[in-house]
Amino acid sequence: MDHKTSSSNFSATVSYDKFERFELWLRDNGASFDQLELREYSSADCSNEFGALKVEEAGNASPSTSSLSSDDAEEKKEQPLTSEEPDEAAEMRGVHAKVTIPPNSVCMAIPKKCLITVEMGQATEIGMQIMNSDLDLDAPKHIYLMIYILQDRLDPESFFRPYYDILPSSLSNMPIFWSQEELKRLEGSYLLNQIADRIEAIEEDYKAICEICPQLADIATLDEFKWARMCVCSRNFGLQVDCNRTSALVPHADMLNHYRPRETKWTFDDERQAFTITTLQTIQAGAQIYDSYGQKCNHRFLLNYGFAIENNIELDGFCPNEVPLELTIAPSDACFDAKLDFWCREDSPPIKRVRVCVSNNENTKIMMSMMRVIVADAGELEAITGSGAGGGIRCSGSGIGVLVYRTCRDVRFPLSLRNENAALHNLLAVVRRALLAYPTTLAQDNEQLAGNTLPQFSNARHAVIQVRGEKEVLHHFEDFVLTSLQVIDIDQDEQFDAAIKSMEGMGKHHTIIRYCSDVIGAIRREEKRRVGRAYLCAGSRGLAQYGSRGGPGLGGSYL
């Protein structure tokens, strides 16, 4: 069916509001979502039980309650409670079940003809010019979707007119549109740099495209280009359509709110030639139907979707919130030149940022590896860089095995008690320096969030949720270091074992207990073996010269 004819009757349907016209358009073109309805919430309805609510900011939009469909992917939403312009109504909506829906039910199907895909943007004149150029764009797939909607929305007879009409006219919840007063609440957070980088990247893309396609300036201003970027960023789905990997805007599916764990799944069904959403569990009548945007740190939710999750914790207790730690070699380091050469291998930058969370994941291991390099003395540096006679060394059972480290990310085993002690002290300094960059404390953030000064779903509240999450991670690593330093100098095995056991009763995080028990415990055992070897090889005089805590070696594998 020709796109234009299938939506032309809606211009005269003045008795419907924009959401009713939107749903009627979808149904007339083969969409199915009869078990679902769209509900609008008042501010009194907005509590944490609604997950991450979507807020549409649209001028002169009349509220509606009509049937809706949605999906469960990593789609993106808008959602603050207040709007920048006083005459704009902030519309908070969610998708609800009209009836009880059993698991494994397809509750929504949107036909392919109602999807806007990357290929449609590439087929436009501007899209083809971009494809034939050598432009290095920040988000190419997003650009093609943006180009299509920016150009097509100008056509009053566009097939997608009902969809364009329900898109928010402004996105003041997205941090790139925040006021300076709102951004000030993020002081101390690296997210401010990411917001500035995002703005710069969008502006550079707009300028670069205008240079090869001057007609873009006739289609959209820079502000409209920014709006389109965040609209696409917060709504697009990564799909495989007819064996082709693409990204698409899926009307109705992009209106589901976020919740973890996921309750639905979505895909493009090649047989049905439609985007479908299927329930993973029973959805009771009246309950909201959610999409999971994935397990993400709040900085990604806030930057890309315009909201932050107050209790961003998985069912297993894991919190994906992260904070970037900035690491570098001090110019005053006695081994600065040699260390910097190893630090920057494979064209790695001299200043490195490692995102860590409350976990012993890969990034935590990389962070500890870098800490060991930063505080390495001349002998340890010679060993780990392979510049010595034997190359890098590590503990291997009862002896010492050779191991050359390729980069500063690869020192996964502690080198010695001296080095690990210094690495922990350096980590403590990094963490405390990061905490001092914030104008408020964690306790003050918790007090604000518990009080009534920050409205639900406001930009101000989301900013405090974001920085509060960063501080929680930093305080975890502060506790990690302080607890480790309490046991690293214990000489007697009985006292060491008792200290480890006491941590469990104190409620220490399991990653702290594991590190102290496995890593520090392993270094202690290796140091004792080293002392024994020193006695055998050099006698008591040689031992006194060697020192009970000197020399590079490795033990433990937890971090």
Image (tube, rainbow, N blue to C red):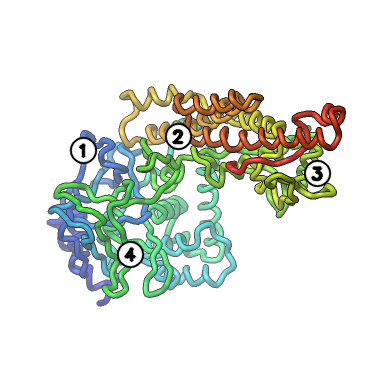
Q: Is mark 4 on a helix, strand or loop?
A: strand
For marks 3 and 1 on the same chain, the one whose residue lies earlier in the sequence = 1
Tally the numbered discs. Answer: 4
The Cα–Cα distance between marks 1 and 4, rounded to whole angstroms, is: 32 Å
For marks 4 and 3 on the same chain, the one whose residue lies earlier in the sequence = 4
For marks 2 and 1 on the same chain, the one whose residue lies earlier in the sequence = 1
Q: Where is residue 278 in the image (x, y as percent from the top left)?
A: 26, 60
The residue at which mark 4 appears reads as 267
Q: What residue type is labelled 1?
A: Ser
The Cα–Cα distance between marks 2 and 4, rounded to whole angstroms, is: 32 Å
The residue at which mark 1 appears reads as 42
- Residue 308 shows in the view: no
Of tags 1 and 4, which is closer to the observer? 4
Of tags 3 and 2, which is closer to the observer? 3
Q: Taking 373 as reference, is 139 left or right? A: left
For marks 3 and 2 on the same chain, the one whose residue lies earlier in the sequence = 3
The Cα–Cα distance between marks 2 and 1, rounded to whole angstroms, is: 28 Å
Q: Is mark 3 on a helix, strand or loop?
A: helix
Q: Which mark is residue 382?
A: 3
